[in-house]
Image (tube, rainbow, N blue to C red):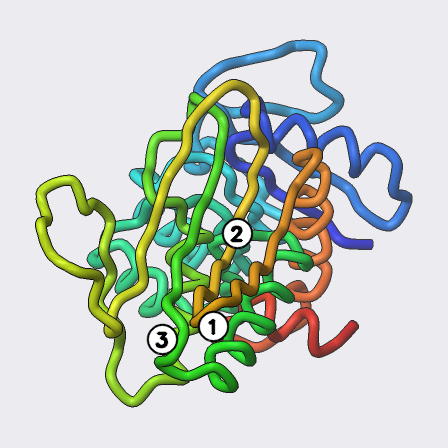
Amino acid sequence: MTNIILTGALGRMGRFITSKVSELEEFNITCGVDIANDESYPYPLVRSVDDISNPDGVIVDFSNHLLTESLLQFAVANNLPCVISTTGHTEEEKKKIFLAAEKIPVFYSYNMSIGINLITELAKKAATLLGESFDIEIVEKHHNKKLDAPSGTALMIADGISEVFDEKPQYVFDRSCRREERSKSEIGFSSIRGGTIVGEHDVIFAGYNEVITLSHHAASREVFAMGAIRAAEFLKDKPCGMYNMKNLIGEI
């Protein structure tokens, strides 16, 4: 049995995870954390992790990056594994995530979809084979409620691609003020926000007279919910350290 403490329990992803766990006998949500309340929920809800009297399980966080520091302090104090699924972290917040991983097992990924992590690995392979003769652009599309741009997933893909080059490419997020040709040493980003788009990412390799595109389309948030649930199961018995989807995929 994998017990879960779910932060952001009443948010979009929290509700998806709650629904999926109710269908799975080997998982159980012991407590939910959210500033809102819903007395009809199938497990106890509290407003803060500090209000949890008997913390038991793997923390799965889909709340807000601003709460990351207090969440990690609680996890370390209670020796609880932590799956960080929020995005938009500052560099300082990322440092605190890595510091916490020295004391507890931490699973950190910009995207909990196994498919999008596979796309990242394929993009790295493509960049290795195509080299600098192909221009690289990343187009990401999300719903109109998403706060950060470009998406954490787009940055994750770009960071993966950058690993294969001797010098890290320049990330270009806006060309509206530029009056110059595109350089070879850059990765361009385009962000689209509209409607209820769950998440779409295209990695474009544009060369001489040919274009190669790697695409991932998430039709439902269920793919992210299942990824987070599997991450919790993966993490529950691990020693302290930093883990990600690459580690999880390696065990599937």
Q: Nearer the viewer, residue 249 or 173?
A: 173
Q: Which residue is mark 2?
A: 202
Spot occupied by residue 166 in the image (x, y as percentages of width and height): 29, 89
Res. 114 in view: yes
Q: Amino acid at mark 2?
A: Asp
Earlier sequence position, callout 1 versus callout 3: 3
Spot occupied by residue 143 in the image (x, y as percentages of width and height): 49, 26
**SS of the residue at dot 1?**
strand
Q: Amino acid at mark 3?
A: Ser
Q: Amino acid at mark 1?
A: Met
Residue at left offset 9%, top offset 42%: 177
**Residue 172, above or below 21:** below
Q: Nearer the viewer, residue 55 or 188?
A: 188
Residue at left offset 34%, top offset 30%: 147
**Residue 107, above or below 126:** above
The quarter of the picture where the C terminus appears is bottom right
The answer to which quarter of the image holds residue 148 is top left
**Residue 186, above or below 148:** below
Nearer to us of marks 1 and 3 is 3
Spot occupied by residue 2 in the image (x, y as percentages of width and height): 76, 53
Q: Which residue is mark 1?
A: 242
Nearer to us of marks 2 and 1 is 2
Spatial CA span between label 2 and label 3: 16 Å
- Tell me if label 2 and label 3 are in contact, CB under 8 Å: no
Earlier sequence position, callout 2 versus callout 1: 2
Q: Which residue is mark 3?
A: 162
Q: Nearer the viewer, residue 89 or 236?
A: 89
Q: Residue furthest top?
A: 39
Q: Nearer the viewer, residue 132 or 84?
A: 132
